[in-house]
Image (spheres, grey):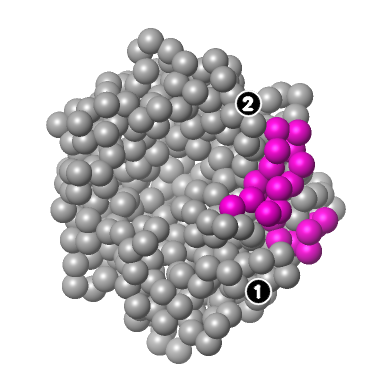
Amino acid sequence: MNSKYEINTKENREFLKASCEELLNFGHRFPSPNGGSYYLGDDGTPWKNRNRETWITCRMAHVYSLGLMLGHEGSGELVDAALKGLKGELHDEKNGGWYAGMTQEGDIMPNKQCYAHAFVILAASSALTAGRPGAKELLEEALAVYDRHFWNEEEGLACDTWNTEFTVLDDYRGLNANMHTVEAFLAAGDVTGDKKYHIRAGRIIDHVIQWAEDNSWRIPEHFTKEWVADLDCNRDRPDDPFKPYGATPGHGIEWARLITQWALANCGEEKEKLEKYLQAAEKLYTTAIKDGWNADGAPGIVYTTDWNGKPVVHDRMHWTLAEAINTSAVLYHVTGKEKYAKDYAKFMKYLDEVVMDHENGSWFHQLDEKNHLKGTVWPGKSDLYHALQSTLIPYHKADMSIAPAVKKNLEI
């Protein structure tokens, strides 16, 4: 194996550092005149005929907050552009909160999404860490809106979607929004010092671990309003970009890392408690990789499987690889188990040889089962969030959100 793919080598660190800089260079053209993020095309050209979505704008604010702290030229202005969008065209002055996005004609996209609001918290937390003006006020508002409309203290979980006026709540409940809520709460807790956000993240995590354990470590994604798992949801639309049928190995991998981060930050000297969470994280990761990686004779992680672990949608989404890189690195550093280092090297090789676009920049966002480019779910290269984080998380301390870890230079 080439040493540039192996964890803890000088060559691998240099490879990730160069990749990080290339990604940051790729995304410079995202801001629209009003700040909302354009969806980026194959070579980083904005696709102005697509909606300017809040979650993408938040991701770019987060990414360039990291860029600013890493010394990437022009990052401060790019963060400020995204914050302008979040305080301007994407913000609902009348009803509070944030629209799902704006259409190319300047009309609002209806509904208020928990998913998008979680990303506003993440973006504001990272921008505050990077010292951007207005970020503190944005974070305070985002947390207040989230507390008022999305967090259910009794259940210890978040709901999913309101109408634009926050008067009608959809019956659907989902774990994708709750997963990004955990990420956002961990960041908010790290940045504000308010422990309640870590406590909430832990409550969500406890639910998820129980649901996974009861389902052979394949996490149910979709639920009724009573939080009863709907295992047949979207069986007829299996490649839905946000509500796909079945298990999503990439999410099993992502949850494993978030659980590890939470446990390291919150279990302190309670070694038995820490071990319990780490074992759950390892089981989630191991099941997802066993089900998803090279499941059909070609490298890559399949998008979804059925409840027995058999692939349903064979496409490879770039974000699943990014999360596999992150989690294998974190689990290796935390457990010292060689199998995670081997996985990491395997993922790095696949990234370099197949998923990175060495001609136009960034990563191919969707490949088919033979690793040929495909654009049915994720055409173009919408944003940089997953890819960029995978150049940083492997070598930063695992008990802290990535923005404060970068700010404090907590490298491993």
**On residue 365, which mark appears?**
none
Residue at coordinates 22% horizontally, 61% vertically from top-left?
A: 42
Work out whether mark 1 precedes mark 2 in sequence or the reverse, and give the earlier one: 2
Residue at coordinates 49% horizontally, 63% vertically from top-left?
A: 320
Q: Position of residue 325 (x, y in %)?
A: 49, 67
Q: What secondary structure is the stretch in magenta mostly built from? A: loop
Residue 73 visible somewhere in the drawing: no
Q: Secondary structure at mark 1?
A: loop
Q: Is residue 306 left or right of residue 116?
A: right
The image quarter in which residue 84 lies: top left
Q: Which residues are magenta?
A: 213-234
Residue 298 position (above or below residue 268): below
Q: Position of residue 363 (x, y in %)?
A: 32, 65
Q: Position of residue 398 (x, y in %)?
A: 57, 53
Q: Are marks 1 and 2 in contact (CB under 8 Å)?
A: no
Q: Position of residue 184 (x, y in %)?
A: 53, 37
Q: Which residue is identified by label 2?
A: 151
| Number of callouts | 2
Q: Secondary structure at mark 2?
A: strand
Q: Residue furthest top?
A: 94
Residue 144 position (above or below residue 20): above
Residue 378 position (above or below residue 34): below
Q: Mark 1 or 2, which is nearer the eye?
A: 1
Residue at coordinates 21% horizontally, 36% vertically from top-left?
A: 104
Q: Nearer the viewer, residue 327 or 271?
A: 327
Q: Which residue is identified by label 1?
A: 310
How many C-alpha atoms fall within 10 Å of the one at disc 2: few (<14), some, or many (≥20)? Answer: many
Q: Give the amino acid type for the residue marked by disc 2 in the picture.
A: Trp
Q: Give the amino acid type for the residue marked by disc 1 in the picture.
A: Lys
Measured in 3D between alpha carbons, the distance from the residue under mark 1 to the one under mark 2, in whole angstroms, is 34 Å
Q: Nearer the viewer, residue 342 or 168?
A: 168
